[in-house]
Image: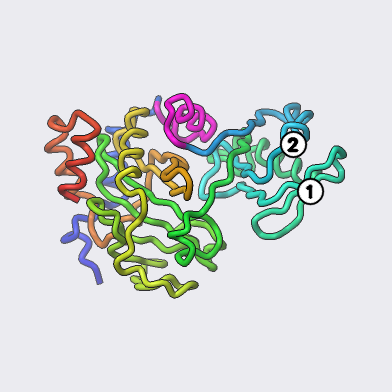
């Protein structure tokens, strides 16, 4: 049994009262809560993020959608204000035909979806079925991300990602999230994905948990985690710090996916990152957050923030 107090574990009430409320400006929330605004912000900044092929803001926008899909081989549709992966449809293959009725989509669960079913899913997203507050939403059609070969034996379907928590622009803790069979290919820890603690100084996996139990191997592939080092680690840290510079959010989670051809790419940002990352690392956030707070006046440049993180965490 872990002694939470001795590990400096940050609890939910303290997270909200001491870090989210005082350090995250409400006016900045739309830039991380709304994936469409996030995509546009990242695109304008030149930071690596999934390419935005198209957006749908109302049902009338679907009138010429069939033609806009022409030329795409695969893509992802997602709600702008969804959470926990709900409402996302991954299209692995598009069989486009001049006739809408003969256009079909092969999804990630190997099901075939005809065009009418595709439009129904779009309309469900627009209605707010998957949005955080149930209000009408918008639809993003984005680039489908690939899996770096490093992760081939570490996942069951899906795409792994790295969650980096930053405080005042300084990376303080990181976790690799690996999809499993019971998480149905999603990287959500609450649904059974594996969470791996990551050493910020090197990118090496240090610990791993599944449903709050420590494990040494991936439950589906039997791949041992010991000694594994995430590729493009230094670049991932720099990308996370650069993204934190874009938004006035002091306590921030940045989710990064490693691409085989271009390295790290920002999947999304989160103004309320969860606390399971502490269990994955078997270490508390509090001492790290307090250390950053005491040194923040000395950490002005991006390089100084990265160096401080690498030297201390």
Residue farthest to the front, as pictured = 261
Which residue position is annotated with label 1? 104
Which range is magenta?
28-48
- Label 1: few (<14), some (14–19) or many (≥20) C-alpha neighbours in 10 Å: many
The residue under the point 13% across, 31% down is 298
Q: Is residue 201 above or below residue 127?
A: below
Q: Visible in this render: residue 18?
A: no
Main SS category, magenta section: helix
- N-terminal of the pair, mark 1 or mark 2, is 2
Provide residue 231's location: percent of width, then percent of height.
36, 53
Residue 305 position by quadrant = top left
Tell me: 183 left or right of 242: right
Residue 126 sits above or below residue 6 on the image: above
State the count of labels. Answer: 2
The residue at which mark 2 appears reads as: 70
Circle 2: element type: loop
Residue 262 image position (x, y, % from top left): 45, 43
């Amino acid at each position: 049994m872990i002694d939470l107090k001795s590990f400096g574990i940050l609890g939910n009430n303290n997270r909200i009262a001491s870090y989210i409320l005082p350090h995250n400006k409400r006016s900045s929330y739309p830039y991380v809560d709304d994936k469409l605004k996030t995509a546009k912000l990242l695109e304008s900044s030149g930071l690596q993020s999934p390419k935005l092929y198209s957006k749908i803001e109302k049902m009338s926008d679907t009138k010429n959608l069939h033609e806009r899909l022409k030329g795409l081989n695969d893509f992802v549709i997602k709600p702008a204000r969804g959470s926990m992966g709900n409402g996302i449809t991954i299209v692995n293959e598009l069989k486009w035909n001049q006739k809408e009725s003969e256009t079909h989509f092969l999804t990630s669960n190997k099901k075939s979806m005809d065009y009418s079913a595709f439009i129904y899913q779009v309309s469900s997203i627009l209605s707010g079925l998957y949005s955080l507050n149930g209000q009408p939403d918008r639809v993003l059609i984005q680039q489908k991300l690939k899996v770096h070969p490093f992760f081939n034996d570490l996942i069951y379907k899906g795409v792994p990602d790295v969650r980096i928590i930053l405080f005042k622009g300084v990376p303080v803790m990181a976790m690799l999230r690996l999809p499993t069979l019971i998480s149905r290919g999603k990287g959500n820890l609450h649904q059974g994905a594996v969470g791996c603690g990551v050493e910020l100084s090197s990118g090496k996996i240090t610990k791993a948990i599944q449903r709050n139990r420590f494990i040494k191997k991936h439950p589906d592939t039997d791949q041992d985690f010991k000694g594994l080092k995430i590729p493009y680690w230094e670049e991932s840290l720099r990308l996370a710090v650069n993204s934190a510079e874009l938004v006035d959010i002091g306590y921030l989670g940045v989710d990064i996916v490693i691409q085989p051809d271009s390295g790290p790419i920002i999947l999304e940002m989160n103004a309320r990152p969860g606390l399971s990352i502490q269990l994955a690392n078997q270490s508390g956030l509090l001492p790290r957050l307090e250390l950053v707070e005491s040194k923040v006046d000395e950490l002005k440049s991006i390089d100084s923030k990265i160096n401080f993180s690498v030297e201390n965490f």
